[in-house]
Image: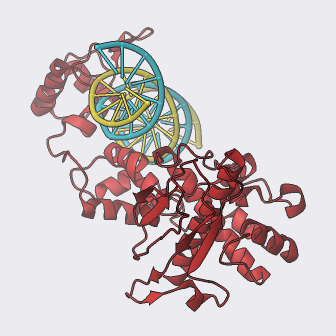
Chain colours: A red, B cyan, C yellow
Amino acid sequence: MEGSSTSSWDETNGIKKGPWTPEEDQKLVNCIQKYGHGNWKEVSKLAGLNRCGKSCRLRWTNYLRPDIKRGTFSEEEEQTILELHALLGNKWSTIASRLPGRTDNEIKNFWNTHLKKKLFRRGIDPTTHMPRTDNLVMNSLANIPPDQLLAAVNSICINSALPCQDSTTAIEFAKMLYLGNILQFLNTSNSTHFEQYPAPLILDSQLEALLYSNSTPYTSASTSTFPNLNVSQTIFHPEVEELSIKSNRTFTQQISDNSEYGTSSLCNNYSIPELVPASSPESFTVNTEYQTTKGNIISPKDQFSNSSTSTTFDVLGDLMDDEASKYFWKQVTEYVLLDYFLHVLIN
DNA sequence: AAGCTATGCAACCGCCTCTAG
DNA sequence: ACTAGAGGCGGTTGCATAGCT
């Protein structure tokens, strides 16, 4: 940045603006070493700089000051910023006063470019430092007639290993689906594995409005038909860092002999079959089990009496045409979502 | 290799507060 | 008590560069 020749001039005052040159820096440093910096307008004049006092002050405090610590923030510094921000909000100068050698501008930039995104990915609202599930959409679920919610959630979970039995479970499940959608939305830009399959879910406009405006009430299931819960077009993204599943799991496939269908690709702990439209596999089965954080191996049926460790996906038709392909991936998607949510419940 | 996009960060802008006259 | 100017602060912009297609 410095040394660039893109500086501009303030037409009205004949004051130079833009990036500082090394010569200007040297003049400013020499002047401050000689006279100090009581009056910035005076500093600018004494240094022979065509800069306003404000610009000189900023250059000194944010860049030239000898006690500035440059380079990446340490873990401790990061933690301090997080704690102080939770306490103080965007009081950058106050936060900077607790971090020797760091400027408010540097901390502000670090927050906006790194920490905010990090918190968001962890499912934490960077403004309130509270879990992001505590929002209007979550609360609005309680206003949807229980029977409609139950029906809607189970229509999404069709063929899944985990049908909801009551509206309370349905609400909890809907919340988790929603959370999954948010996480998936935040990470679609990194997805390469599924790019050949139906487009990943982008949050629909109504949901997006709820997220960012916090003003549109979620009306009713009958008119909205659960746009935010429409996971049928979603390919869940298993590469999400925060979702990295710590448990060991195995996905095995049972494939008919004449099928070319069955090459696999490993994504974190998931082994998901690649779609190779060729001869028709009749079905394949996913077997899964879970390891808790305490190391116990359990199966879904230990948690939900009607669940199974094994789910079979049927493939429609003789050929994997577009419709069959979509149907197939819909099932896989739902299963992977369920798999993750179950993991969350267990752990 | 060239063009495009995303990211990081220095610097600016506008508003607020403080203080000297 | 009032006012003008300087300093301080948080938000925003725009440029340089890295990474990707």
Q: Is residue A131 left or right of residue A76?
A: right
Looking at the image, which residue is at 67% across and 78% down? A162
Q: Is residue A318 left or right of residue A86?
A: right
Q: Which of the two residues, A164 or A61, is positioned nearer the viewer here?
A: A164
Q: Is residue A219 above or below residue B4?
A: below
Residue A324 in the image, given as x and y percentages of width and height: 69, 52
Residue A228 in the image, given as x and y percentages of width and height: 72, 57
Looking at the image, which residue is at 15% across and 31% down? A32
Q: Quadrant of residue A184?
A: bottom right
Is residue A57 shown to the viewer in this render? no
Q: Is residue C13 left or right of residue A279?
A: left
Q: Is residue A94 above or below residue A245?
A: above
Is residue A180 shown to the viewer in this render? yes
Q: Going by the picture, which residue comes out furthest to the right?
A: A222
Q: Which of the two residues, C19 or A322, is positioned nearer the viewer here?
A: A322
The N terminus of chain A is located in which quarter? Answer: top left
Q: Is residue A109 above or below residue A80?
A: above
Q: Quadrant of residue A256?
A: bottom right
Residue A159 in the image, given as x and y percentages of width and height: 71, 71
Residue A171 in the image, given as x and y percentages of width and height: 73, 75
Looking at the image, which residue is at 44% across and 57% down? A264
The number of discs equals 0
Q: Quadrant of residue A297?
A: bottom left
Looking at the image, which residue is at 37% across and 56% down? A94
Q: Which of the two residues, A2 or A54, is positioned nearer the viewer here?
A: A2
